[in-house]
Image (cartoon, rainbow, N blue to C red):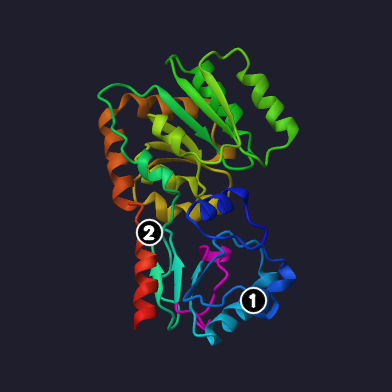
Amino acid sequence: MVRPQPEACRLVEAAGYGVVELGAHELEGGAGLLDHLDGAHACIFDVAHHVSGDTQAAWRGVVDAVSKRRIVSVLIDGLGKHALVQDGKWALDALVVPYVGAPNRMGDIRLLSGPQYAVFDRAFLSARQKTIADQPARNVLLTFGGTDIKGLTVRTLKALMVESARNYAVRAVIGPGNDEDVVAEIERVAHGMDSVELVHSPSSLAEHMAWADMAVSATGLTKYELALTGTPAVLISIDQAHEDAHRPFENAHTALHLGQADQIGIQEITDAVDSLALNVDKRRRLSARGRELVDGLGAARIAKEVMRIHDA
């Protein structure tokens, strides 16, 4: 791993495997990685959160080096402009793009495309047992990514706890990327709201989705976790780019999309949440469609493809 996240390391080690951290310079030509591949049958690269294009050549060199060792190489990529692989000239045995709206062809590379290949922490599979009770929703989860740059947590707290006449119980997730001023403002607004719980930088949202009757969320990757767990949601895009990227997912009808944050007022959030909370049938439809779209078996499907390629 390059700059591995602690939670990723924990999951890998819990599964009985070791973690090796490589510096960016060790990617050049794949030398740093190859030192650790003796006896390996397959190498899976997860660059789904690729940051910039300046390391593209380095990653291509790594893939080429692994391919020359006759090791099965699979790369899990991002979507659209966030994708590392932009053409079919990579020496990959398979490319995984586990998102709605993913391409259906990438040159001659075997392409595993769509949310059926999305990989999740096992905890989310347990949270998948959600049932939609025959009563209005009360437990509402708020989650707006690692950094709430549009102040959506504060605005939604005001929408649900001040403007709404309903008696909600709210868990508001505060992501690790928020600066002190943002956190302080969220805490100030939440102070005195008896049925509001602030959750700081949780390692997983699975237990919170299991608790929630519904959610209000940004249109990031969390929407796939919400779909998997069958959690009905009101989604808000932070800007035009996120709204455009979300459009294919919106067509799957697993959640309600309000639009862009800068074009939405507090009252609109109140009305959307209140309406969905009161509509049991609609929440059941959204929940069912989400679980139809994302079933949590992506890791098994990828493993099966790796073994098929290896045994060919």
Q: Position of residue 157 (x, y in %)?
A: 55, 24
Residue, disc 1: 35
Q: Are marks 2 and 1 in contact (CB under 8 Å)?
A: no
How many numbered marks are there? 2
Residue 77 versus residue 101: which sits nearer the camera?
77
Query: How far is the residue under mark 2 from the one under mark 1?
Result: 29 Å
- 5 left or right, relative to 276: right
Q: Which quadrant is the N terminus positioned in? A: bottom right
Q: Position of residue 225 (x, y in %)?
A: 43, 45
Instruction: Classify 10 Å Cα crowding around label 1: few (below 14), some (14-19), many (20 and above).
Output: few
Q: Earlier in the sequence, mark 2 or mark 1?
A: 1
The region drawn magenta spans 77-93
Magenta stretch secondary structure, dominant:
loop
Decide if residue 104 is in sight here.
Answer: no
Residue drawn at x 35%, y 45% as measured from the top left = 254
- Considering the numbered disc 1 on the image, is that residue within a helix, a strand or a loop? loop
Which amino acid type is shown beneath numbered disc 1? Answer: Asp
Q: Is residue 238 positioned above or below 157 on the image?
A: below
- Considering the numbered disc 2 on the image, is that residue within a helix, a strand or a loop? helix
Residue, disc 2: 298
Which amino acid type is shown beneath numbered disc 2? Answer: Gly
- Does the magenta segment cover residue 78? yes
